[in-house]
Image (cartoon, helix red, strand yellow):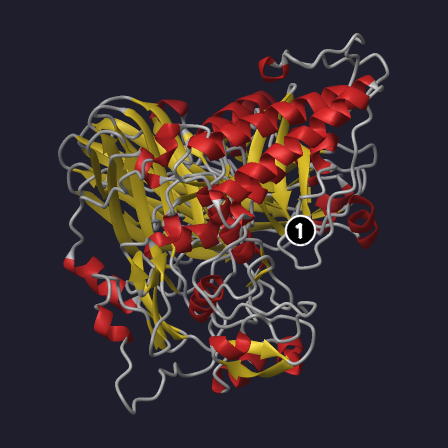
Amino acid sequence: MSSNSRASIRASSREEALQSTIDAAETSMRALKLAKDPRDKARHSARVKQLLQEAERIKHCEDWRSAPARSSASQQATKIPASTRNPSRAEQILLLKASYLNNLKFPPWTTPPAPDEFDLADGESLFVDAPELCLSEVQEEALDGWKRPHEALPPPSWSFGGVVKQGPSMSFVRSIDLVQDAATDCSLVASLCAGVARAERGHSKILRTVIYPYDEENRRPIMSRNGKYFVRLNFNGCFRKVVIDDRLPVSSTGRVIHVVDRHNPGLLWPALIEKAYLKVLGGYDFPGSNSATDLWVLTGWIPEQVFLQSDDLEPERFWRHTLEAFDLGDVLITMGTGKMTPETERDLGLAGEHDYAVLDLREVEGQKLFLIKNPWCEGASWCGKTQIPPHAVMPDRELSELASIESDEDTASMQCSRDLLNADKELSPGTFWMDIDNVLQHFESIYLNWNPGIFSQRQDVHFTWNLGDQKDGRQQHRGQFASLSRHPQFTATASKGGTIWVLLSRHLRNAIPTGATEQKVAEGRHTIDLQGHIALAAFSSQGQRVLLPEKHILKGWFVDSPQTLIKLRDCVPGSVYTIVPLEQDLVAAEQTFTLSVFGKSPLTLAEAAPRAPCTSVVPAAWTKETAGGNAHSPTYPSNPQFSVAVLQKTGMRLMVEAASENASVHVKLVYSKGQRVQEIRNRDIIFDSGEYRKRCCVAEFAELEPGHYTIICSTFEPNQLGAFTLTVESSQPVRTTAWPKEGAGRLRMELSTAIIGVGNGKIAARLIPKRLVNFYAIASQLDSASTRASGNSSLLRMSIESGRGPMRRIYTASNGGEYADCIGGVRTGGLDLAPETLRHGEQLWFVLDRMCTSTDAREEGFGVVLFLDQPDALACGAWRTWDD
């Protein structure tokens, strides 16, 4: 706001304001005539034009106290849309339960209170709200007591130089200048400043419906006769009633504990709104939030956080869009800094991790400027300046109002417009103009709160998300790579398309007391749970639930704020979008939320439909015996396998989700004639999940023919142990059962350790069948951990054969007769063997053949296990060296 606008607001009459503005214009005209420097002449010319325009406004405008509005349309109060969706019975109960916070009840707002709520009967005491709000240690030390407004305002410690102090009031004479001192709620005070600045620009008063009693005729709050006030705040799914008394914490020192108006120190309503808000948040010792959240609670305006360091930010587009909405009064702007060193804070005149209000936006001579206010009582102003190069020339504009003022000298260059504005002595302490380039450099986020009245349609849904122990006993997998199977999911549809805004609002809840906080709770101190981050993602999945987060069409940033917003632009009419809330590190407990969608055509908000009507979940695990690794590992068939009986054609989707975030997992479905798979052939693979994915993977097939199939679940690395779940979704009923693990139902026969000595490559042991037996063998290198670390593992081939040279006969061999890495083990296929299988005099040998990858054929030991279907059906001799 310009200094002449502030002067008109401070004036006691229209005539006084007009005369003050004319005097200022004449002073600037005289300065213009005397100016020699072209920069000074340009500055005084612009000043004269501005003052003359202001004089005309004061002379003819009915509401002459208000600052000029940039658009007459902005003075219209827009209608705030209400949700057209009827909440279910469960949602109604959820909203009622969400009324309880800090051991207090904040019921949903229904209607404004009746006037007699604030009457004081004869002999009746003033209303006292219990308990008193908690203070921080610093505030406690400075506290003189909780006092009524006539003792608290203006602050007793403030000096007024012999001028009679104005007592507590709901009205103001000078422009409002709210500041904080001994409180930590900079975000709240910045929010109030942004709302006040909007009203001073001539827009409708959005704080009008916040505090009661309220004078509808004069459109302002009024003093309560009994000291009771009702404040209407928006949190936990709806507007709620917060009841307070008018006692304020008064300091015995020069500090002020509550928010105060520096220009009108007797103004009461800001301190009452602050008290109500802090009652919800636990007390005056609240550590602070962010202004987007605070304005959402105060006004119900849609919060958005813009990350200024994001690569997606387009500064020019952002400025144009924001300036247009700001001119119309459809956005409130605050901003926050990130962490700064004390040296940086001192050099810049900015505070780290601090919220600032934006009072005005202007574009002057090509500079995009923000008028920024530090809400601290003794807040510093930004120290930066822009260096104008000597050749830069900003020509003055022709001033029709000053046609009688002529100068023979040409206007050359003038100072940076921002620096000229900052030279205005009428700027309040801690208020300064900053150009957009410096905003982008020195601030971390801009908070925008959008007027919901820009939309005509709205729907809300209230839901619970249990992040703790599940009632069905299933494990809640969480983290970056977890599936979305346990996430609440919804669909949003705009009948005529266009833009849809989706807002997720996390309900406030008290932190679970542990350790030292238990004593604080016993003392009546409650803290709000601020742990964790939330985000939203949107998918185009025909309104069905989704399992993996990767294929989103839009995903918002994870924020530590209780609200997060995404904007779906150019939506196709009637197209159904799946909306999924995301979280990181929220407390593992039952959390409640509200999801709101806004649009300009009729909306539909509903729960997302399951992808398939039939779902089964099978818990399982990779153990020492079953962690076989990927399909290139010889022990792959030892992985957990599941039989699937498909009776009629069906679509199918498989999901494997591991308990460990470090496991890369895969799922495959193969045709197996109802048998456990011993080896994989490409022609038998029906479908799989593709590349190994951390923690969770999904595979799906549109139409699976009737038959018996086998599912194989694997990790990329062998011997990676841990629990997992297999989820089978299908359009028709199927029967899923776990196959017994490798070797189940068979007798395990361990051979003596096979040692291949230095310089040797092959050893063998004689096999003697006693009767018909079916068996297979697995051989693995001993001490594989040290071998893997050294990188000197051998390649191994295992075979069962007879004869030599041209008479050699191979009954079975591992890996199709090829050498394979022996760290994970090698295996043969199943073999039926009986004494009569051998020719007369033929001997059967179990052969281990290694190919060393190192230059040194060192001694290595191998363990060999046979799995037989008959007891005592096979004998094995000692190992011996073997030559072809």
Q: On the rendered structure, is 98 left or right of 804?
A: left
Q: Residue 15: x, y in percent?
A: 50, 41
Query: Where 473 sits versus 826, above or below?
Result: below
Query: Which amino acid does the dot numbered 1 rest on?
Result: Leu
Q: On the rendered structure, is 153 left or right of 615?
A: right
Q: On the rendered structure, is 645 left or right of 232?
A: left
Q: Residue 692: x, y in percent?
A: 50, 35
438, 689: nearer the viewer: 438
Determine the secondary structure under disc 1: loop
608, 571: nearer the viewer: 571
385, 338: nearer the viewer: 385
Which quadrant of the rendered structure holds the C terminus?
top right
Q: On the rendered structure, is 606 left or right of 352?
A: left
Which quadrant of the rendered structure holds the N terminus?
top right
Residue 794 visible in the picture: yes
Instruction: Tell me if mark 1 has few (under 14), some (14-19) or many (20+) residues whose alpha carbon lies within 10 angstroms of its own.
Output: some
Q: Quadrant of residue 546?
A: top left
Circle 1 residue: 782
Query: Where 139 sits versus 767, above or below?
Result: below
Q: Quadrant of residue 260?
A: bottom right
Residue found at x 32% / y 69%: 106
Outermost residue toward the left in this view: 648
